[in-house]
Amino acid sequence: MEVTSSPDQFKQAMDGARARGELVGLVPTMGDLHEGHALLIRSARDACGFVAVSIFVNPLQFGSRADLDAYPRRLDMDRAMASALGADVLFAPGEAEMYPDGGPQVTVDPGPLGGRLEGASRPSHFRGVLTVVAKLFALAGPCRAYFGEKDAQQLALVRRMVHDLNIPVRVVACPTVRAADGLAVSSRNARLSSRERAAACVLFDSLSTAAALVRRGERRSDLLRAEMARRIGAEPLARLDYVAVVDEERWEEPSVIESPSRALVAARFGETRLIDNLLLPWPGEGSMQNSDVSSRSGR
């Protein structure tokens, strides 16, 4: 596996793979790789002749320098994992390589959705995310880019950016990887105490409850939100941030769901903020999709 911090060398590797007639897959990450990232890399490996993994802790999407500095960096372990999973190139630039002028003067506006839900809790976060993803797409060129459904709002915004700006990238969504108890795999889980880790399962429990209600015919969003909030509120260690039900296509919040929709939750456990979501069952859409056993533990 080639390892480079040079944007030019990364671009040359991607261009070279396409010149050889290979389908290129890109897995953008901030490192601290776990089973969720492993699923993305395996999915890219299964579909593409050439697989690139990027690791860049993007300062534009952090609310404070302290949070940025505290983000875990373990490049040696990440390099070993990416190589073992079959990546062909690892692009691991520093801030100076990605933002040689100290930060971009031109950034990507995430639009109205970027200010709601996660955007309301983390102002400017999605502007930072889309800006760095746009840079990575510009360097990578035409490819398939793999993102996890756990960050569903981010995924929706990346898809919208690709569509609106005619970027020649196919965005591929991969299901949320969950532990046996349903908790979504996340780098943030390592910050939880044992009691907080057990309490955090209430997020998936609340989403599963909403899915069960929809399966029984409930369509009123206010009732679904109230039940999710009640479940999370009953856990003493949880501090609820938001619950929401959005239309899967437009990400609007209807009073009555009339099309495939997604339930979303965010809450704090101690100092750790976690998010989760679930595509709700819908006639003709199969089961809950991203909550079934195949999405757990990377299986």
Image: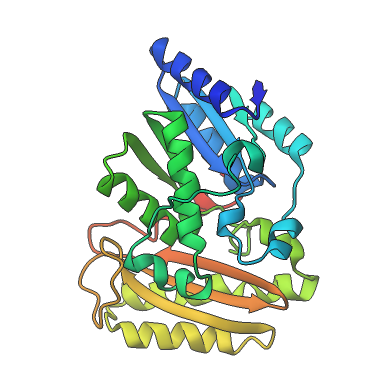
Q: Can residue 202 be seen in this view?
A: yes
Does the image show residue 291?
no
**Residue that lies at the very extreme toward the top in this rendered image:** 20
Where residue 94 sits, quadrant-wise, is top right
Give above or below for 46 relative to 278. above
With respect to residue 100, does 116 lie above or below? below
Q: Which of 134 and 20 is in front in this view?
A: 134
Residue 276, position as x, y percentages in the image:
52, 66
Q: Residue at x 63, y 64 (%)?
A: 181
The image quadrant where one finds the N terminus is top right
Assign the C terminus to one quadrant of the image: top right
Residue shown at 74%/38% (left/top)? 75
Figure quadrant of residue 144 = top left
Q: Looking at the picture, how far across and down is residue 58, in whole percent?
A: 60, 50
Q: Position of residue 234 (x, y in %)?
A: 60, 89
Determine the residue positioned at 62% across, 54% down: 59
- Left or right for 185, reference 225: right
Q: Is residue 208 above or below residue 13?
A: below
Of residues 156 and 224, the one drawn nearer to the viewer in this rendering: 156
In the image, residue 44 above or below residue 225: above
Closer to us: 106 or 61? 106
Where's residue 2, x and y in %? 64, 20
Q: Residue at x 45, y 58 (%)?
A: 127
